[in-house]
Every structure is written in C-alpha cells, then in structure tokens.
Image: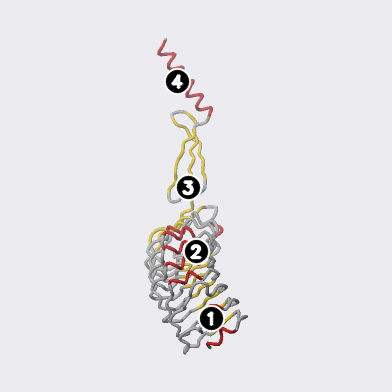
Amino acid sequence: MRSISKLRKLVSLDIKSCSFVQELPEGIGYLETLKELYIDGTAIRAIDIPEGSYGKLETLSACNSKILSLPDRIGNLKSLSYLALDDTELSELPYSIGFLENLQTLSLRNCRSLWKLPDSIGKLKELQLMDLSYTLVNELPSSVEDLRNLKVLKMVHTFLREFPGGIKNLESLEEIDFSDCRNLKGECNIMGLSSLRALLIQNTDISELIVMDHLYPNLQNLRRDGNVRISKIGTTKEAQHGINGCEATTLLQADGHHISMQMMISDRTKVAVRQKQESSQGTRLG
C-alpha cells in the first residue's frame, strides 16, 4: 500500500471494514487531488496531518474505528466539509477542531465515551449538522450561539439537563432532536427559532414549551409527551382602557422569557390632563 503515494490523480480512497489495516499509506496526505478518505471499521490508531497535507480533503469518515485518536493538527484540514467519527472511543475533541472553517457536517453519534465539546466549537461558522446522539454530553458550550448556519441538532439519548440557552436564537435551525433525554427538565423556549420545523422532545421531563404564536403553525413535526404545556406568546397586543378617567394604550411586547409593559398616553389624553391642571391652578389663584 505504500506505493499509493504515486497515484497522483487519486480522488477517493475507500478502505472501509479492512480491519487488518493499522496505518495509512505513507505519503497519502500529499496526494494533491485526494478529496475523500473512508477508513471506517479499520484498526488505524492515528492520522498524521503535517502542515500542508490533505490540502483538498473534503470528506473524512472514520466510523467504528474504535481505537482512533484525533491529532491536535486536525484543524489543518482547511477544506474539510464532512467529518464522521461515529462509534469511536473518543472522550474529547481537540481544541483545533474549531479551525475547520469549511466544516458543514460533524457526526459523533454513539461515541459512548464523549462527555464534552470544546469551546472552539462555536468557531465552525459553516456547520449545518451536528449529531451528538448517544454520547455522555450533558451540556453545550455557550459558544454554540455563534453557529449561525446550524440547521440540524441531534442529541438523542444524551444527558442534557436543560434546554441549551446558546441555541435559542439560532435563526437557521430547522430540526432539534432531544428525544429520550431522560434528564432534560424545565422549559423549552423556542421563541427565537424562526426556521424550526421539527422538534422532538418525547420521553424527556420537559414541562413547558414556549413558542411565538405566529411561528407555532410552522412546527410540522412536533413530538412531545402529553403532559408538556404549550405557551403561545403573541408578538404585540394592544388594549384600550382608562386610567384615572384618561385614555391610555397598554403595549404588551414579548421578549424571550419576559413580557414587558409600556404605557402610551394619547395626544388627546395629554391635552385633557394639561387643561385639567391649568383649570386647577386657576381655581387656586381665584
């Protein structure tokens, strides 16, 4: 396999299920046309990624490579858009994962030893899909609020304890799957998720779903337990009423968890109040 470095026009290398393979061919990283590398189910322990190697690699799939470890230099794969590491024994990701500036898919499904993500995950500006299902992850770093292109977030059967605050304003998010997260409690606030179409929170301990009234019809796929209360919040409500005999308008504006109240007195009311004050002053002077 060492002679593979002579295949200057090689675009894709697939050695899936070659369980006897323990290392990659020497020099493979310098194949200038290589775009896809599939090493799923091999015995490869590490991938050497020196500076300037794998320059055009877009896809790296290493699922079920149980003993694989990721090098700190993983961030050198500047062209990588798809990274699948399902069913590996990874417990953490290197900080340099955040340097994968073109990464669109990150799949870590069934990594049973993975317990946290680095803060650098928020640097993945192009990330569209992240699958952390069946891992030990119990929270997301606050930096996920910067994943403005994230469309799909899957965390099935993880140890989440509360709805991640960092994702509540990700306007591109279309699908959230938190099903079977038994430790997930409290409220699920999706008021800022204007593109959300699918929300799966069945078999959790979520007590309340808070959603904007005009966005609720967009939820084409909502799966929840029967005891989850749904609170629909209107954008703006106005009500006419009197205060000490004067007309006023009360504006109720929904904003996140809170509803603020603002009193707006009409021009006619202001004139009436001013005339009443002048009349009262005239009476006292007389």
Q: Name the amino acid type tagged 2.
A: Leu
Q: Quadrant of residue 46?
A: bottom left
Badge 3 density bin: few <14, some 14–19, many ≥20, Cα 10 Å: some
User: Hey, what amino acid is under mark 1?
Assistant: Ile
Task: Pick the residue in front: 46 or 163.
Answer: 46
Q: Residues within 10 Å of mark 4 (few under 14, many from 20)?
A: few
Secondary structure found at label 3: strand
Q: SS class of the residue under badge 2?
A: loop
Task: State the separation of the CA atoms marked 3 and 4.
Answer: 35 Å
- Taking the view exactly as shown, the residue that stands out farthest to the right is 9
What crowding class fits label 1: few (fewer than 14 Cα within 10 Å), some (14-19), or many (20 or more)? many
Residues at marks 4 and 2, CA–CA distance in whole angstroms: 62 Å
Q: Earlier in the sequence, mark 2 or mark 3?
A: 2
Mark closer to the observer (1, 2): 1
Residue position for label 1: 28
Among the two numbered marks 3 and 4 on one chain, the one whose residue lies closer to the N terminus:
3
Camera-side residue of 100 and 5: 5
| Disc on the earlier residue, 3 or 1 | 1
Q: Which residue is mark 4?
A: 277
Outermost residue to the bottom: 20
Do the residues under discs 4 and 2 have CB atoms within 8 angstroms? no
Q: Mark 3 or 1, which is nearer the eye?
A: 1
Instruction: Give the label on residue 124, or none.
Output: 2
Q: Which residue is mark 3?
A: 254
Which amino acid, by three-letter code, is at mark 3?
Ala
Label 4 and label 1: CA atoms lie apart by: 88 Å
Locate residue 243: give its quadrant: top left
